[in-house]
Image: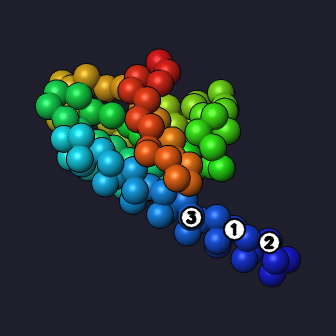
Amino acid sequence: MAFNKERRRLAYGRGRRAELIAAWWLRLKGYRILAHGFRVPVGEIDLVARRGRTVALVEVKARADLATAQAAIGARQRRRIERAAASFLQRYPALARCDIRFDVVLLAPGRRPRHLTDAWR
């Protein structure tokens, strides 16, 4: 049991570091980070970023290679992110006038982050 707890703790730390790298990357591209690690019972959004009238709800995936990172985002996870997005947008009605999209930032060792805009609808 302690082994599983330790693995979860380490994975959580790796995920948070990946989110910080992704936030840095998005800032370099001109985005302003509105939220980091937004959690509700129905799901989680890693990053909420805005550039102009566009609000990007961003999922961050870090794996050994970019293809594996991209493959790690399944339909079930997309639905959880979409439910969390609805909750986030309900809390911040001023964002309703913005264009909303779902983005992904993929990370792999030794590679530049890859930002996939409008990854799904």
Residue 79 appears in the rendering: yes
Q: Marks 1 and 2: CB-CB under 8 Å?
A: yes
Residue 84 appears in the rendering: no
Q: Marks 2 and 3: CB-CB under 8 Å?
A: no
Disc 2 crowd, CA 10 A, few/some/many (<14, 14-19, 20+) = few
Reading the image, the residue beneath label 1 is: 8
Question: Mark number for residue 4?
Answer: 2
Of residues 35 and 103, the one nearer the viewer is 103
What residue is rendered at 31% in x and 54% in y?
A: 24
Of residues 27 and 93, the one nearer the viewer is 27
Horizontal and vertical percent position of residue 46: 45, 49
What residue is rendered at 19% in x and 41% in y?
A: 30
Query: What is the residue that sits farthest to the front in this orientation?
Result: 110
Tag 2 secondary structure? helix
Position of the N terminus by quadrant: bottom right
Q: Nearer the viewer, mark 2 or mark 3?
A: 3
51 displayed left or right of 48: left
Q: Nearer the viewer, mark 3 or mark 1?
A: 3
Residue type beneath disc 3: Arg
Horizontal and vertical percent position of residue 39: 47, 53
